[in-house]
Amino acid sequence: MSDNYREQALALFKEGDIVTFNVLCEELEDQLLNLSKGKITVETFQSFFKNPNKFFEENGFPVSINYTMLLEDMIKVGCYDWWDEHITSRNFQFIGEGVVNMRLHLVCFMLAATTKRIKNHLDSLGLKPAKLEHLLAFGSKYPISQRNFPIIAFDSSWVDHDGIQTFPCLDENKVKRRLVLGYDWPDREWGSFCRFLALSK
């Protein structure tokens, strides 16, 4: 990327934004390439350049999932300050091969709601809940996000010894980035401040 575009990209970056500077530059370069090949319109490129955070919200967050890695290694790449000891390869199995590139979406329900209601909402948007490997890929590439709100992946779960279903979540506690298990006890409603990671069907 030319220094001129990097300078303009840096001007778009503000501390605390979901989009980190390195990711923004990488995506800007991809969009420039798509523009030069006629894959996107000038209007689409301008909408990205004008407001990258809105663009990511509408078009998804690009991530790469490396299925050749063990779960434990994916956790290490994310550099979390703390993670639940039950999030292991024994309790969560991945089904996939090679490296898969995709875009993920963060959905805010705006209201406190049950798991079932949120899943129905995702379905109405043409989305399906993300799995643990998606969550880890997102957390690794967008580490700032979980400092702003908890992020939950509903398509991976583990049932604890008391029979309660749990879902992997990214959050922050006392400045520490954590990979935790959120308990879905009967009649639980997830807070309106939560975000739910999803992908297109």
Image (cartoon, helix red, strand yellow):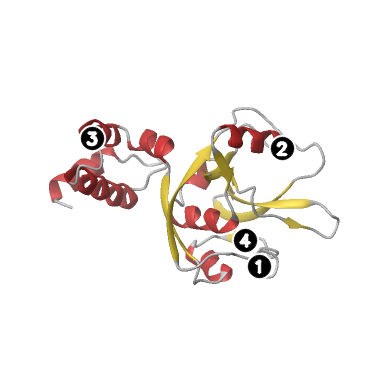
Q: Residue furthest top?
A: 111
Amino acid carrying mark 4 in the image: Trp
Q: Quick one: label 3, few (<14), some, or many (20+) residues within 10 Å?
A: few
Of residues 115 and 140, the one drawn nearer to the viewer in this rendering: 115
Q: Which one is earlier in the sequence, the residue at label 2 or at label 3?
A: 3
Q: Give the alpha-carbon distance from disc 4 to disc 1, as whole Å.
A: 10 Å
Q: Which residue is mark 4?
A: 83
Q: Which one is earlier in the sequence, the residue at label 3 or at label 4?
A: 3
The picture places residue 110, in percent across and down from the top left corner, at 59, 28
Q: Which residue is mark 1?
A: 88
The residue located at (59%, 64%) in the rendering is: 94
Which label lies toward us, 3 or 4? Answer: 3
Q: Which residue is mark 3?
A: 41
Which label lies toward us, 1 or 2? Answer: 2
Q: Which one is earlier in the sequence, the residue at label 1 or at label 2?
A: 1
Q: Which residue is mark 2?
A: 116
Q: Determine if residue 193 is in view.
A: no
Q: Which one is earlier in the sequence, the residue at label 1 or at label 3?
A: 3
Q: Give the alpha-carbon distance from disc 1 to disc 3, as whole Å.
A: 44 Å
Q: Which one is earlier in the sequence, the residue at label 4 or at label 1?
A: 4
Horizontal side of 198 relative to 183 (left or right) equals left
Q: Secondary structure beneath disc 3?
A: loop
Amino acid carrying mark 2 in the image: Lys
Q: Which one is earlier in the sequence, the residue at label 2 or at label 4?
A: 4
Q: Quick one: label 2, few (<14), some, or many (20+) residues within 10 Å?
A: few
